[in-house]
Image: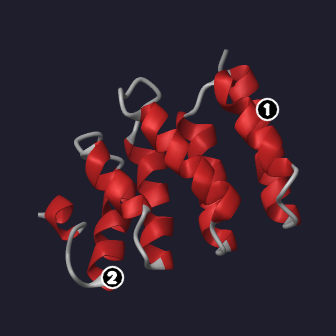
């Protein structure tokens, strides 16, 4: 029921469903559903989708490469600092050492000091994941 609400017509219902998934940390979530939610027009839905990716997707998931690619776009291009910050955390949670250059490139664009600190922490986390 929660997973079907991710596609609900109401942004509030979608955001609440994604927050529920993130809180449960279930790995029974469709990567395609999460990918779709990452592209949502609503800022809160995008942020909650990113949080769901971080808590519901393991590094071993076959969809990690597609998810990291989408998260990278959000980390660099989303206008909302909360979405960018959550994207950094999600890449650090599911990414691999090979994703460190994404963080290094993001550092050249990001002006928000909190996000920059989180990117640096993400680099350290991915280096230790070797």
Name the residue: 78% across, 59% down. 115
Query: Could you say where residue 123 lies in the image, as x and y percent from the top left?
Result: 77, 35
Residue pointed to by mark 1: 124
Provide the secondary structure element on which disc 1 rests. helix
Give the vertical position of 53 relative to 84 (above or below). Answer: above
Q: Image quarter for residue 104?
A: top right
- Say which mark, if any, is on residue 11: 2
Q: Is residue 82 left or right of residue 21?
A: right
Question: Which of the colour schemes (rainbow, by chain, secondary structure, one colour) is used?
Answer: secondary structure
Please count the marks in the image: 2
Give the vertical position of 53 relative to 85 (above or below). Answer: above
Q: CA distance from mark 2 to mark 1?
A: 35 Å
In the rendered view of the protein, which quadrant contains the N terminus? bottom left
Q: Is residue 125 left or right of residue 43?
A: right
Give the vertical position of 23 relative to 41 (above or below). Answer: above
Provide the secondary structure element on which disc 2 rests. helix
Q: Earlier in the sequence, mark 2 or mark 1?
A: 2
The residue mark sitting in front, 2 or 1, is: 2
Frontmost residue, 51 versus 110: 110
Q: Is residue 120 left or right of residue 81?
A: right
Query: Could you say where residue 102 lies in the image, as x and y percent from the top left?
Result: 71, 39
Q: Is residue 109 left or right of residue 74?
A: right
Frontmost residue, 58 versus 104: 104
In the rendered view of the protein, which quadrant contains the C terminus? top right
Q: Residues within 10 Å of mark 1 (few under 14, many from 20)?
A: some
Name the residue: 84% across, 55% down. 116
Query: Could you say where residue 113 lies in the image, as x and y percent from the top left?
Result: 88, 63
Say whether marks 2 and 1 touch (CB < 8 Å). no
Name the residue: 64% across, 75% down. 80
Query: Could you say where residue 5 lies in the image, as x and y percent from the top left?
Result: 19, 70
């Amino acid at each position: 029921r929660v997973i079907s609400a991710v596609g609900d017509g109401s942004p509030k219902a979608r955001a609440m469903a994604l927050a529920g998934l993130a809180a449960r940390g279930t790995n029974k979530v469709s990567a395609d559903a999460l990918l779709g939610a990452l592209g949502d027009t609503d800022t809160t839905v995008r942020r909650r989708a990113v949080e769901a990716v971080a808590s519901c997707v393991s590094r071993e998931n076959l969809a990690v490469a597609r998810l990291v690619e989408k998260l990278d776009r959000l980390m660099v291009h989303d206008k909302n600092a909360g979405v960018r910050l959550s994207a950094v955390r999600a890449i650090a949670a599911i990414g691999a050492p090979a994703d460190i250059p994404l963080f290094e490139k993001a550092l050249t664009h990001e002006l928000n000091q909190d996000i920059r600190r989180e990117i640096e922490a993400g680099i350290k986390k991915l280096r230790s994941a070797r």
